[in-house]
Structures are given as C-alpha cells and as structure tokens.
Amino acid sequence: MNNPHKNARTTPHIRALIVDRAIRQQQSIKDIAHTFGISRRTVYKWLARYREAGDAGLESASSRPHASPRQMPKQWVELIQKMRLTL
C-alpha cells in the first residue's frame, strides 16, 4: 500500500530521506524532525522500522486490524452472499 492519506506528513520517499539524514549524514533527530515538520518520536519510529525491515519498513502499512474477534462467521457471510444473488 503506497497511497498515504492526503494529510500524511511523510511518504515512503520522505521516510527514506529521514533515514538517510539520520544514519548516513549523522544529522540530529531534532534537526530532522524540524526540517520535515514532524515529531522526534516519528523520526525514531521510521528509524526503528528501517532497522527492522530495511527499505520495506518505510512503505505504508495497512491500518486494518490483525484480528476481528466479533467478525461474522464465514458461513453466514457465504449464505448472505448466496441469498443476495438469488433474491
């Protein structure tokens, strides 16, 4: 997913610049945050994701929950879909 919402401060390209400035250029986290108009916490977040997953960690991730415990049972969903097609 590489389509950030319209108010996103960072894109994968900007995140790569953040990592480059922090790791390769040795700029301070405070200066990087100020330059991009984000918090220091956000800079640390992208650095951690880069260290964990490399360039793939800088891509936008889905905000969908990992689990939906109250989700309707699969057989009910299939039954409803069949009924919609026949009625």
Image (tube, rainbow, N blue to C red):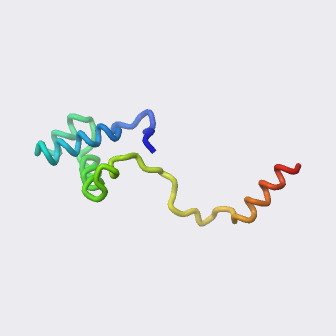
Total tally of numbered discs in the picture: 0
The location of residue 20, given as percent across then percent down, is 19, 43
Q: Nearer the viewer, residue 35 or 58?
A: 58
Q: Which residue is drawn at the image coordinates 21% and 34% (left, top)?
A: 35
Looking at the image, which residue is at 47% across and 50% down?
62
- Quadrant in the rendering for residue 72: bottom right
Which residue, as the protein is rendered here, is positioned at the far right?
87
Residue 80 falls left or right of residue 23: right
In the image, is 14 to the left or to the right of 67?
A: left
Q: Tell me residue 3's x, y (percent).
A: 45, 38
Q: Which residue is found at the position 79% from the left and 60% from the top?
A: 79
Residue 38, image quadrant:
top left
Q: Is residue 63 left or right of residue 57?
A: right
Where is 13 relative to 41, above or below?
above
Q: Between 56 and 3, which is closer to the camera in this rendering?
A: 56
* Residue farthest left in this picture: 26
Give the vertical position of 24 relative to 80 (above or below): above
Measured along the vertical axis of the image, is residue 79 above or below residue 4?
Answer: below
Q: Quadrant of the N terminus?
A: top left
Could you tell me which residue is drawn at 51 percent across and 53 percent down? Answer: 64
Picture quarter containing residue 24? top left
Q: Position of residue 80 (x, y in %)?
A: 79, 56
Please indicate whether residue 60 sits to the left or right of residue 30 in the image.
right
Q: Position of residue 11 (x, y in %)?
A: 35, 38
